[in-house]
Image (spheres, grey):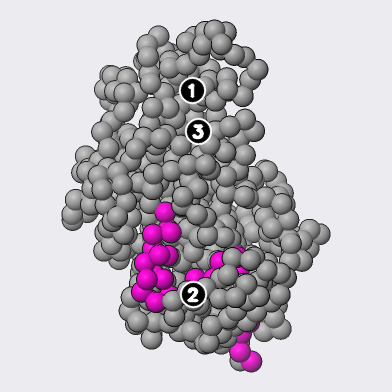
Amino acid sequence: MAETGTPADEDGGVGDGVDRTPSPRADVCVVGSGPAGALVAHRLAEAGADVVILEAGPRFDFSRRAAQMETHLRAGMENPWEMGGERDAYTTAGRHYPLNAARVKGVGGTTLHWQGMVMRLHERDFEMRSRHRVGADWPLSYDDLKPHYREAETAFGVAGALDNPYAPPRDEPFPLPAFPPSHSDSIFAEACESLGLDMHSVPNARNSEPYDGRAPCQGFGTCKPVCPSGAKYTAESHVDKAVAAGARLVDRAPVQRLEHDDAGERVERAVYATPDGAEHVQSARRFVVACGGVENARLLLLSRSETYPDGLANTSGAVGRYFMDHLFAGVGGRVDRRTRQNHVGFNTSECHQFYDDDSPVNGLKLEFLNYAGPSPVIDATHAETWGDELLGQLRESYGTHLTMGALVEQLPRAENRITLDPSRTDDHGNPVPHVEWSLDSETRRALRRANEIQRRVFDELDATVDWVVGPENTGPAYHQMGTTRMGSDPESSVVDAEMRAHDLSNLWVVGSSVFPTGGAMNPTLTIAALSLRAASAIESSM
């Protein structure tokens, strides 16, 4: 049933004329409209299923993207995606985890402000326990996911090249040609060649030429947090396709809990709220939880019952546990030549040379950053300097910086987890997510190794190092993973290889929360591939 406008008294108090009352019993209720939920909803709607999508946040008007970019660039660096406050409250323990720094609640989810880099996991990532006696094995292999990776790259419109000698095997080219190396990449290439380091292109979910009704990249350089041209993929694309195929989208409708039948074998209802504070019940034959690595676990924990006192689908006790992220290692400095920093807002070259060499076991990938910090332009425009003085500062400080980064794998540990904090509640009176997160010695060792390689490159360039981010001052890449892990054993995992919950026959959980291990590759392409695999399984069950 397609979304239609209705009188304002049915819109939940927003005043936008959108009907937020429940649909009749649907075939599938999808909770969340990021890449996981959007791809599942589109696939099932195209197959003829009656699909309802419940999204906690609003639909952002694309015509306002340029204004959102300006909001970000102006003094104060405001969040253009309206994150924060009671709605998005959380608490942390151990190492502070800045949860709201890089998530979005809205139609399209975090793809609204992601960087757009999309790599396949390597074969070793699916077999960490078997190969290295650490972490866990996935209940599926790279070969099992390979066709879904291909489908995901087509859905996103990935621009890439077959120039990475360390990439896992593939059978076809990328949908779009790769972006050429940036000017600063060419500077790094001189040093890397001398040191025997291999550079290769980065697959990007942004258009290098027109694709799927979207324009090619215009080079605004503000990819994170806002792409004003629409060249970068967002899940809005597949939400729109799902609605065109007959799905119904209900925005500003945060799901409060899922309720199951008397036997505890099937989910029957999603209870959601509207902005006026009213609660509504959406019934469906199948449910798909697609809220992200933290909110997936939180929703299941909020849905506890007498049958599931520790949280829905949590007889294993694994819901919320094994929380992982990627850690950042970086070195930044200056060289005595023009680098054209920030000329490109995304990475065009990287290095996977140290990913599979098992020394240390934690994977790492090196990145050559085209948004080298600091940004003197933004810093200067926020200062009280004007005229010739400002121009002199910019001429002196801008355009000679270089930055290398790295993503480092964090292995799953049960004590890193998402729980509920009853001492603080959100705008609907629910306990907020509580993030318990810390780093182990193996992760720190991998961070140090990344810094050592980066310093070698800067020494080869005869660069002045201005800053280093390493083991003690590292931060997350905001890739939340592992909190509803998949596995073959129901006693130690939440979902199976098709992302169906072990405990309930009509509940699927999709997204990075199902990753048993995280590797060191940006996770969104794997999120998409797994979601398409789950969609096929759901379609087969109908």
In this rendered view, identify the residue nearer to me: 138 or 406: 406
| Residue 292 x %, y % | 53, 60
Residue 228 location, quadrant = top left
Q: Along the polypeptide, which appears first: circle 1 or circle 2?
A: 2
Instruction: Report the amino acid beneath label 3.
Output: Ala
Q: Which residue is drawn at 55% across and 29% down?
A: 469
Q: On residue 202, which mark appears?
A: none
Q: Is residue 192 left or right of residue 66?
A: left
Q: Note whether 373 is above or below 288 in the view shown.
A: above
| Residue 15 x %, y % | 63, 66
Q: Does the magenta stretch include residue 254?
A: yes
Residue at numbered disc 3: 329
Q: How crowded is mark 1: few (under 14 residues within 10 Å), some or many (20 or more)?
A: many
Residue at numbered disc 1: 332
User: Which element carries disc 2, helix, strand or loop?
Assistant: loop
User: What is the CA distance from the residue labelled 2 to the residue labelled 3?
Assistant: 48 Å
Q: What stretch is highlighted in magenta?
A: 234-262
Instruction: Report the amino acid beneath label 1.
Output: Gly
Q: Residues within 10 Å of mark 2 (few under 14, many from 20)?
A: few
Q: Residues within 10 Å of mark 3 (few under 14, many from 20)?
A: many
Which-is-in-front pick, marks 1 and 2? 2
Q: Answer yes or no: is residue 452 visible.
A: no
Residue at numbered disc 2: 4
Instruction: Report the amino acid beneath label 2.
Output: Thr
Q: Residue at x 37, y 55 (%)?
A: 525
Quadrant into which the N terminus falls: bottom left
Q: Is residue 34 left or right of residue 358?
A: right
Asked if the residues shown at circle 1 and circle 3 are in contact, with their CB atoms under 8 angstroms apart, the answer is: no
User: Which element carries disc 3, helix, strand or loop?
Assistant: strand
Q: Residue at x 57, y 57 (%)?
A: 105
